[in-house]
Amino acid sequence: MSDAARGARADAFDKHVVPHVEVLYRVALSLTGQPADAEDLVQDTLMRAFGAVDRFDGAYPRAWLLTILRNTHVNRNRRRRPVLLRDGESAVVMMDRLGPCAPASEDVVIGNEFEAVVADALAALPDKHRAVVALVDIDGLTYQEAADALGVPRGTVMSRLHRARARIRARLAAAGTIPHRRRM
Amino acid sequence: MLRMVLMRARCRRSARVLQSYLDDELDAPTAARVAEHLEECRRCGLEASAYTAIKTVLAAGDGGSATPLDPRAVARLHEFARSLTGPEGPTATA
């Protein structure tokens, strides 16, 4: 590779990839649940992005990087735990079987009943629903970015997210923290 | 009576897209219609407030699942990124 090509690749990497390191790490934490695994996953993702950035057209870098992150995550799990990813099984099904995405912190200071109920409701969600809540509400991804990160259609992200929030809302209503939902 | 039926229809339309509205995922005209309805309908406005509170608590990490970013880990990742583009970095990984 010539010096000029190497320089162009480095420039593209600095422009399209480096600004997204934090969000990649956030999403990796949501996917792996382990800080050390998340850091390794982001390093692998950065390596792959560096290798491919000269072919990247510059459109929607975050979506492009999240797709690389997801593929890297799936490949790493396939390599480490071959029995977990069966032929034809999607990354999401595999991730569901890997267990909770992020263990609830033991040292969370719960300020009031509302927050306590939300925490309980979040913990009680099915894993795949909690993963979507983590990506959208906690990591701040758009529906499409969450879809890219999980490898599912945007509509699936929406239905899981909306169902998850409705469950949290129902818990709050049951606890008397907010009014019950009225019929339309 | 007609006024109430029309209002109910607007409530149903608003409820269908409320989550997307709160996530800023609607086109501008639809978002404007929802915003207008939430101002005129107290019950839908309260519903929106409830979900906004849920989103706020989750985003603040008080829901118990958010892991604050370790600044040392972020610094190591930036250092790693710099090592890729520096003179000692890989030249043609694909």
Image (tube, coloured by chain):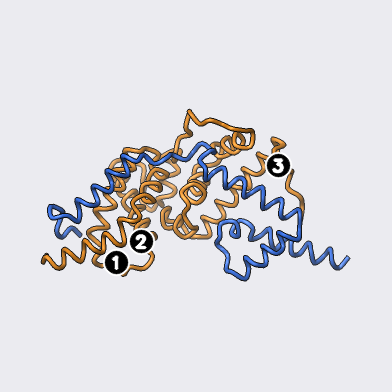
**Mark 1 or mark 3: whose residue is earlier in sequence:** 1
Marks 2 and 1 in Cβ contact (< 8 Å): yes
Look at mark 1 in the image and give the residue it sits on: A56
| Numbered label tally | 3
Quarter the C terminus of chain B occupies: bottom left
Q: Which residue lies at the image location 24% right of the left edge and 53% below the top edge?
A: A47
Q: Residue furthest right?
A: B1
Q: Which residue lies at the image location 62% right of the left edge and 43% below the top edge?
A: A168
Quarter the N terminus of chain B occupies: bottom right
Q: Which mark is residue A178?
A: 3
**Side of A80 where A150 appears, left or right:** right
Where residue B42 sits: x, y (%)? 76, 54
Q: Which residue lies at the image location 42% right of the left edge and 44% below the top edge?
A: A30
Q: Which chain is blue?
A: B
Look at mark 2 in the image and give the residue it sits on: A64
Kind of residue sitting beneath label 3: Ile
Q: Nearer the viewer, mark 2 or mark 3?
A: 3
Question: Which sits in the foreground, A126 or A23?
Answer: A23
Where residue A57 sits: x, y (%)? 31, 70
